[in-house]
Structures are given as C-alpha cells and as structure tokens.
Image: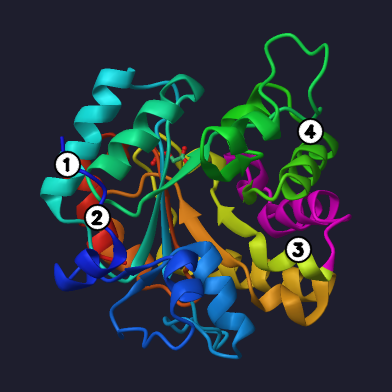
C-alpha cells in the first residue's frame, strides 16, 4: 500500500497536482504550465487575478473536467482495483478527473485514490433534496461531504426518467450549493424532442428552472453537462455540429440568466463518449470536458479519454 504523495514529491515525480493546501503553504508558488489544479486551488488562483489554463470558444480559460459516472456498477473491491489501474494508466496532466461511484463505494474509492497518490476527486451520482431527517433511503448532501465528495451529478437523465422534474432538480442543486458541493447539472433533450426541433427550447427550460436561485457568488462552483438523452448508453452520438450548437446555446443561456458569471462554468458533453470519439468531441468549440458512463468503468479507457481532452 503506498502512502499519499505530498505535493513536493508529486512535483518531483513530474505529476504537478496543485492543491489549495499547496497554495496556502506557499502563496508565491510558481504554477507549472502543465499543472493540474484542484477546484479549490483554481478558486484561489482566480482570486489572485490569474486564470487557470485552457481556452474555450468564449475565450474563458479553464482546464478540462473529465467525470466518470459509474451508475450502478462496481463493488468496493472493484473500486480499489480501478484506482490501482488508473495509477498504472498514468492519467494525464492538465485535466481535472472526477469519479462518481455508487454511494456504497465512495469512502473506499476516496481512500484508494489517496493511497495511489492520485488527485482525482470524488463525486456522487445524486443527492437528497432534503437535509438530514426522516427521509428513508435518501443520502443528504452533508453525508456526501463527510465521505469526501467535492462534486455531485444533479438531474442526470436516468434520474429524470425515474420521475425527477425540473423543480426537483432545482432543489437538489440548491442543497448541493448550500453544502458547498460542486454540482454538475445535466441537461438534454429526448429523441422525440430533437426530431420536433425542440432541443434548444427544452434545454433552455431545464436551465431556467434549475438555475433560478443560483447567485453570482455560486456560479463559479457549477459545471454543466449537455447530455442528449438518446445518446446515453446507446452508442449513438450527435454530429459535431449538433453538439457545438447546443454547447453554444447553453453558454448563451447561462450568460443571459446569470450575467457575466455565466461564462465561468465548464460545459461538458456526455453521451457515448469513448476513446475512439473523444478527441473529436473534446475538440469541439466550447467543450469543457466529458461526462462518461460505460467507457469510464475501465481505467485504461477513462485515462485514454482524459488524454484526448
Ligand atoms: P454513457 O453514459 O457514456 O454510457 O453514454 C453517459 C452518462 O450517463 O452520463
């Protein structure tokens, strides 16, 4: 079992992960061009008036966010094996990796990633819209924070299929922000809606309701994922033009709704992202990273997609 590497060792090992702790310990720290910053470290860098790397079509600079959604897959033993595999696969610099396992594997995966010296962050796939209380079966935001989650997926299409409406998604976004989690808000249309020419209006409605209560100070903690519902788990992907149109539409809606701050959140693409199509999808203008289901169950494929970002 390997002990977590401290930041000096990480830098010496040519794996320049920069955490908020590194920046607090050394406020004058020179940030290497290929460094990966944790979200908190990115906030600190921005507060210094600098911007972390990666330019998108809007001219905003950010590092790619690459998120694994394991859905209802993997035991704790398999989560440990994934962390070991990812360490072997030498996941790339310059991207922020997040893994969202089932609730039952959060704790184990967090420990395994730390033991491997990987600055991969933990996310949950869902959150209760309530605080703690008499809500049988629900997992509250506070409990996610306690097991080390920084991120939480909100409004995934498989939750929407299970009956979540926009108002419920908005409540989940609110409790996540209140708990200082970073929500990844998923939006996207069904095939019928796309065929009816309603993709943009459906996404606009989803954004409008979910983001209604988000303040200017909270925008920087948000990420968005455009996931056409018909592309999830099907092997189908929209054309590059269709993805670009929707990514740009989402950015315009964010700015219209949230003002200047709407330029800040990363907008990811999700839906049948695989190593073979990742470079093309990730190279589209305005694409800030990927939300990956099936392909992210394999650490080698996950690392290959990250390398394409
Ligand atoms: P998929 O899933 O990559 O298996 O299509 C994407 C998702 O569920 O976010």
**What numbered label is drawn on residue 5?**
2
Q: Where is 105 relative to 298, above or below?
A: above
Secondary structure mostly taken by the magenta-highlighted segment of the chain = helix
Q: Nearer the viewer, residue 22 or 302?
A: 22
3 or 4: tag closer to the N-terminus: 4
Q: Nearer the viewer, residue 235 or 159?
A: 159
Real-space Cα separation, disc 3 to disc 4, in angstroms = 22 Å
Q: Residue furthest front?
A: 25
**Residue found at x 61% / y 91%:** 49
Q: Nearer the viewer, mark 4 or mark 2?
A: 2
Real-space Cα separation, disc 1 to disc 2, in angstroms = 8 Å
Q: Quadrant of residue 278?
A: bottom left
Q: Is residue 194 magenta?
A: yes
Q: Residues within 10 Å of mark 3 (few under 14, many from 20)?
A: some
From the image, tell me which residue sits under label 4: 165
Q: Which residues are magenta?
A: 189-215
1 or 4: tag closer to the N-terminus: 1
3 or 2: tag closer to the N-terminus: 2
3 or 1: tag closer to the N-terminus: 1
From the image, tell me which residue sits under label 3: 218
Real-space Cα separation, disc 1 to disc 4, in angstroms = 44 Å
From the image, tell me which residue sits under label 1: 2
């Amino acid at each position: 079992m390997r002990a977590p590497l401290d930041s000096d060792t990480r830098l010496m090992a040519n794996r320049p992960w920069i955490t908020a702790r590194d920046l607090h310990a050394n406020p004058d720290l020179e940030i290497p061009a290929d460094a990966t910053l944790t979200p908190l470290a990115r906030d600190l860098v921005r507060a210094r008036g600098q911007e972390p790397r990666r330019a998108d079509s809007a001219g905003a600079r950010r590092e790619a966010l690459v998120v694994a959604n394991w859905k209802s897959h993997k035991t704790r033993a398999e989560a440990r094996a994934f962390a070991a595999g990812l360490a072997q696969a030498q996941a790339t610099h310059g991207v922020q990796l997040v893994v969202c396992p089932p609730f039952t594997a959060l704790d184990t995966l967090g420990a395994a990633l730390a033991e491997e010296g990987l600055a991969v962050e933990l996310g949950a796939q869902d959150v209760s819209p309530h605080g703690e209380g008499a809500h049988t079966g629900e997992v509250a935001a506070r409990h996610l924070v306690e097991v080390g989650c920084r991120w939480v997926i909100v409004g995934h299409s498989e939750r929407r299929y299970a009956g979540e409406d926009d108002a419920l998604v908005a409540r989940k976004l609110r409790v996540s922000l209140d708990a200082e989690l970073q929500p990844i808000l998923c939006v996207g249309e069904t095939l019928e809606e796309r065929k009816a020419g309603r993709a943009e209006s459906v996404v606009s409605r989803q954004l409008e309701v979910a983001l209604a209560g988000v303040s200017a100070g909270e925008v920087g903690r948000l990420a968005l994922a455009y996931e056409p519902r018909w592309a999830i788990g099907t092997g189908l992907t929209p054309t590059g033009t269709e993805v670009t149109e929707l990514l740009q539409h989402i950015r315009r809606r964010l700015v219209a709704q949230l003002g200047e701050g709407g330029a800040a959140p990363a907008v990811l693409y999700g839906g049948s992202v695989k190593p073979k199509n990742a470079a093309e999808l990730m190279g589209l203008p305005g694409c800030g990273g990927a939300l990956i289901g099936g392909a992210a169950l394999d650490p080698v494929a996950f690392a290959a997609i990250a390398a394409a970002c």
